[in-house]
Image: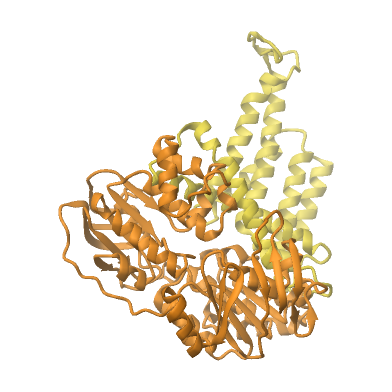
Amino acid sequence: MNGLTFSYPDSPARTLTDVTLSIEPGERVVVLGGSGSGKSTLLRTLTGLVPHFHGGRFAGRVEIDGRDTRRERPADLAGTVACVFQDPEDQIVMTRVEAEVAFGLENLGTPPDAIAGLVRRALASVGAEHLVERRTSELSGGELQRVCLAAALALAPRLLLLDEPTSQVDPGGATAFFELLGDLPCAVVCAEQRPARALEWAERVLFLDGGRLELDAPVDEALDWLRAHRPAFLPRVPAVPSEPAFGPAVCRLDGVSYEGRVGETSLAVGRGEIVALVGPNGSGKTTLAKLAAGLLEPSTGGVELRGRAAYLSQDPGRYLVRERVEDEVALGSDGDLARARAALASVGLGGHERRHPRDLSSGERERLGLACVLVTKPDLLVLDEPTRGVDPERKDRLAELLRAGRDGRATLVLTHDLVFAGEVADRLFSLDEVREPALA
Amino acid sequence: MSPAPAAALLAALGAAALLADRSAPPAAIALVLLVVCLRAKTPRRWVYLAGALLMSGSVLVLSPFLQSAGSHVLWSGPIVPVLGSLDVTREELAMAALQASRLAALSLAFTAYALLLDHDRLVQAAGFARRSTLAVALATRLLPTLERDAVGMLEALRGRGVALSGVRGRATLVSPLLAGSLERGLNLAEAMEARGYGRPGATRLPKARHNAWDAAALVAAVVVLVVGVLWL
């Protein structure tokens, strides 16, 4: 990649500016940077999707295995390059796992008799051979991620690109994922927002800021640079908060269960308290949170809620319904635009009031979702994975924001991010029984 | 049974229902298809079945008031501007029953296709129109995806203390749902291109061998079609 400068159509700002780098065979590279710094765009330039799929203004040169991406279409580069995007649900084409992994092989013209064997080998390499006959719609997030990785590896690429591959999986799943990447024979470039495991796995670190490549160095050197310039991106040991329970309880769950997804569980969250609800994928965190917020009725047990609850779902950017950012937030303030703007400013979205919500980046949409619930001034605030796709510096600011406004409410935060949990919460509540409904 | 012969049989049943000029044959076809659809184990079947029955029921109830045919008047209603006389005749009722049973049979055939067939194997079996078959298979996923997004959207709004009620309230979700599905479509198209879709020389997984049930289904499809053309 030589002197690459790129901006998306209709965007006056450059997403990437004068980026020059080269990736050697077999290298393991992690790309760090804040939300909107250009990480995903950088990966898309390496697949040829930028500029062919997205359009825009493109200057400089990108060569993959000696082939110029301005002349070769992404479909022609497939096989040499393979990519796993951020949200596995949005890249699933077929309804069965075998057909999904075979899809790329078929497109590359693999001899039909060889396809089934390659599919099974790729699934086995990511520990997912048992899923071969399953429907993709029945898989958990972690399983889908493995299937997407298998679909990419089946092509035997020389360059594998991963865009925040562990954003939806629990710490155990994330560790297992990076262990899988350790033995791959190809070069791997991985963009990540949870840097600890990625920095352990990688040999080299790229750091993007505002579309500029600020750092390109081996890991040891990169750690020194991060310590001096961007300490939020350094690996951190999760703190284990253990403050005693606050009183009086705003929300009390007393021996609740729900349709086999949550076993009998009791939990109380007091006013002024922040509780982090942690546990592996499939342990019932989201169901328990919905029970606490009154969105579900328990099968057994009781829920006592004093006051009004607000619940921020996972991936709130999908559920935006208005044409302007401020109108979206004002839905929760009975149309009071002044309150809506104040809530937007509190999450760092001041100045974006008149934009269309779907024009925001994924990290900005997450913050818009947060503003939508904060504006309701709830007695119980429930946040389901609020740090997904959020960079470490924003996570620190989110923790500060939640702690600053804690006194008037009880807060329940569901998260896989134990570092964030340690920084924001007074107390951890763990649902550590591993249950994967899809495997049952 | 393999999906391609099953799809052919469903298409033949739909065609026979359209060819019929009396309401009994398409009603019988609809009944058979209803029984088949009820075998689907997914809870989504109720969404499809409710849609099919609502559409055909609406045609049955409304179309006699919107037509002016026949001379055997069963009920004389007022004259309404634009629509004219709201009389209901025996001929209009017969026509409404025919149209409703045709629509029921067609929508239930689609329901069976959407819920019971393996669309991947259908795509693999498509010898000459793989792109079109893949497009149809992806479009078939639109309805369940929209349904899931609508549920998620309503829940997200409830979580923000916003309750949407009534048809008008829920209608405000149509535009964001469509915008969301367009976004998903773009993401999927991007992922497909990155995986080599559209490259010349594509191959496919070997097809499963046809068995006796497949042959029987193909024969039945031809028989149903011939019966539809000649006798229904």
Q: Is residue A345 left or right of residue A49?
A: left
Estimate the x, y position of residue B56 in percent, counting from the top left.
Answer: 63, 35
The quadrant holding residue A37 is: bottom right
The quadrant holding residue A55 is: bottom right
Residue A436 visible in the current orientation? yes
In the rendered image, the quadrant that contains the C terminus of chain B is: top right
Residue A174 visible in the current orientation? no
- In front of the other: A240 or A402: A402
Rendered view: A49 above or below A376: below
- In front of the other: A218 or A380: A218
Estimate the x, y position of residue B12 in percent, counting from the top left.
Answer: 76, 50
**Which chain is assigned yellow?**
B
Q: Residue at x 71, y 21 (%)?
A: B92
- In front of the other: A366 or A160: A366
Estimate the x, y position of residue B115 in percent, counting from the top left.
Answer: 60, 55
Rendered view: B91 above or below A185: above
**Which chain is assigned orange?**
A
Estimate the x, y position of residue A104 in percent, counting from the top left.
Answer: 70, 75
In the rendered image, the quadrant that contains the N terminus of chain B is: bottom right
